[in-house]
Each structure stands twice: as C-alpha cells, then as structure tokens.
Image (tube, rainbow, N blue to C red):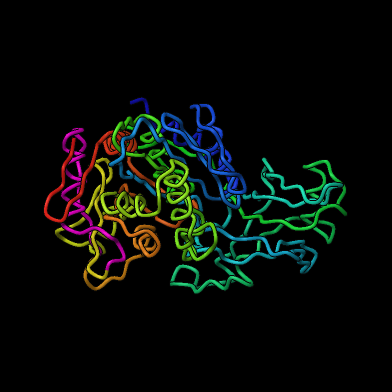
Amino acid sequence: MKLSAKDLIKFIDESPSCYHVINNLAEELRNAGFVEIKEVQDFKVERNKKYFTTRNGTSIIAFDIGNVKDDFSFNIVASHSDSPSFKVKPSSALVNQSYSKLSVEGYGGMLCAPWFDRPLSVAGRVILRSKEGLDIKLFNVDRDLLMIPNVAIHMNRQANSGYAYNFATDMQPVLALGSEGKIEDIIAKELKVNKEDIISHDLFLTNRQKGSIWGANNEFVSSSKLDDLECAYTSLQGFLEGKNSDNINVYCCFDNEEVGSTTRQGANSTFLEDILKRIVLGLNYNEDKLYKALSSSFMVSADNAHAVHPNHPEYSDALNSVYMNKGVVIKFNAAQSYTTDGLSCALFKEICARANVPTQTFTNRADLRGGGTLGNISSTHVSLLSVDIGLAQLAMHSCYETAGVDDIKYMGEALKAFYSTSIRIDNDKILLK
C-alpha cells in the first residue's frame, strides 16, 4: 500500500479548513469512481456501486455496497474533519492604537502559546448573494496575512513563569496598520466579488507553516491538524484499498468533534443513522433488516492518542503508555470516554495481527482526565460494537503537532485489512474471514 508522510503533508497543506477537508475527500472519492448522492435526492442505490454524501460541507459519509448477500453488516470507520483554532466573528473589525485586528474566539481546546509569532491566514467558506439566491464559496487566503504578536519579556516579566492567556485580549491577530484593514475587503478582492454581496462567512485562522519530516533518521512528521487529519486521510486510503464481498464498507468523517459533536453534521447527530437506514431501504429491505445488520456490525473510531512526552514521561500511565512508530494505538477508558472493551480490542487486534500491523494500548494515568472522541458519541444514535484507536503523537491541540512517519503506513494497512474482513458477531462468538 503506497502511503507516505509526504502524501499526508500534501493533503493537510491543501486542507486549511474543514470545508476544504471535505471538498478534497469528495474529490478523491469521485476519482475512485464514487457517485455523489445528495441528501435531498432519492437514495437509489445498487449492488456493486459506490456512493458518498455530504452534510453542511463539513462532514462526509461514503459507502461501498459491493455484491453483498442478504446477511450483510457494516464495517465502519469514523474520524473528524475539524481541529482546534480561532473562529472569525461575524463583525470582526477591531481598531486599537493604530492597528487593525480581527476579532476571533476560540474553537475547541487549543494550546495558545504555539499560535504566537508565526504567519497566519484565514480559510473557510463565504456565503454570497446571487440572482438565484445564495452561493457558497470555499475561501482561502494563500499568503501570510496575520500574526498574533507576543508581549516582550521586558513588559511581561511573568511570561516564562506561567501565564493565563485571555482570549479577548491576548489572542486577537493583527491584520494591518491603520484602520483600513477589513476582512470583507480581502474576501471581495480574493473572490473577485462586490463587497455588498458578502452576506456571511465561516472563517478560521490557519497556520501557514508547512508540514515537515525531520529527525536524525527522518522518523518524525510535523504539521498542523494531525489531530485528526492523519486518521481521516489514512482511513480513507484503507477504505479505497479494502475489498469486501460480504459487508458494506462505510467511511465517515464528521465535523465539530472538538466542540462536542452536538451539531447536525457532528457524530452526535442522526447523520450516520440516516445514511445507514437509507442504504438498507434503498436496497429494498425493511427497517428490521437495518437492526439485524447493525447487531453484527463493527465501528472503528479513529482519533489520535498521546505519545509519551520526551520531557514529561510522568504524564503517561506506566504500563499503558504508547510511542511513535510503534504501531496503531488501541485506547481504553473505564468511564467509557473511549468505547473499547475486551471484545472489541480482541477483534481489532486480531485483524491487525493478520495484517502484520503492530498495536499498543493506551490509557490515561489514573489521576489525569483525558478527552473523549467519536465512538461513544456515535453509539448514542447507532448502537454498535466499537473500538477507539489512533496514532501516537506529541503536542495534541497545538497548531503544529508531531507524529511518527512509520505509523502512517501502519494505520493505512490496518484499516485496509479491517475493510477487507468479513465480520459476523454473535452473543458468544465472532467469525472472521
């Protein structure tokens, strides 16, 4: 399977916002022969055909029906398209002491410090007035546009002694000298439209630093948005490579994981439930067939994990700590922030073993609270046996994160094997072939 750190960096560099992520995933699916079905259309699906649909331009579900028989189930992998950042407010022009700034607010739980003193820009979507109604345009200012400057050590002697950043004052990016800098002027110029036709926008700050491969043996890859575009990209490649004549393969990439997923396009929506039901009904089965299929289906929730930190190994659990380039991470949590249990872990480990992909297990240190992810949220709408996995990385929720080069291929191979495995789940036995 041809999958490299350079491929991942290229995908991330071309995906500065969640809107661009989904647009690029959709384009890759089209190139692989998938047909787009819009949710407003009738779901007319056929065996031996491949389809995808999107919601809000920020979430996507693709499915490969294959030549399945009546006793099919679903092999599902879910990742997310969003990353912690700063969202530009609707009215965003700030003028202070001869500087023009953008008014922004935090999106997700980011590390603030890495955002200072580096070239930034904005990307997302813009909604324009047209003769027919409203037009939606992808937007990305592909140049160094903004910066959030640090306060000099001479003016803030506590900067290296711990500092509580104030989002309303410390984190507002500078756009221009004087009062003439306005984002609407830049949008109009970039899109070649009249400023009066700009009705609204969903824009986020983006880190302009390109991804890099580094280390004594080129063993590390660093980039923005590794959480979770590393999983989104590798799981798509596994999905495209996997072949399954018994089950329906499903690829999901949801938005808004970083803010709780409680949106119409998030994992806590009915999006996945709606699509699975429409697939079953589109194949001329009744609703009972859906529940039978779900009872034997398996979901892989793919979202990255915390590698042991080189300067602070004490933050990791002594017995369940994970390392970069050591394989796919299977994540456990007793409070079910992760859905993995002994059964789902064993099932996924067996699939990986058959593909010669190494695995490792992760738990948080017992006195440190970790984050949640997609699996347990999705299961509130679609009840499935599920495992939470990821790849080990450093500096999660920084605007520039680090992971292992070898793990990219490990994840692709693991998920190719998963998508190529026929799984049948019964109460006391699981069959694999």
Image quadrant containing the N terminus: top left
Towards the viewer: 137 or 393: 137
Instruction: From the top left corner, tell me how far across and down residue 11 is, in percent.
Output: 50, 36
Q: Residue at x 29, y 61 (%)?
A: 338
- Decide: is 164 above or below 355: below
Quadrant of res 246: top left
Towards the viewer: 66 or 211: 66
Left or right of 227, for residue 74: left
Q: In this view of the protein, can residue 310 be seen by the observer? A: no
Towards the viewer: 411 or 310: 411
Image quadrant containing the C terminus: top left
- Name the residue furthest left: 428
- Decide: is 343 above or below 169: above
Instruction: From the top left corner, tell me how far across and down residue 247 is, in percent.
Output: 31, 38
Left or right of 416, for residue 171: right
Please report the bounds of the magenta region as a residue range.
336-364
Left or right of 29, for residue 202: right
Instruction: From the top left corner, tell me how far across and down residue 253 is, in percent.
Output: 46, 48
Q: In this view of the protein, can residue 286 be seen by the observer? A: yes
- Decide: is 197 above or below 10: below
Towards the viewer: 65 or 395: 65
Instruction: From the top left corner, tell me how far across and down residue 328 is, in percent.
Output: 26, 44
Q: Residue 88: within the magenta? A: no
Q: Residue 350: within the magenta? A: yes
Quadrant of res 16: top right
- Decide: is 260 above or below 190: below
Number of labels in the image equals: 0
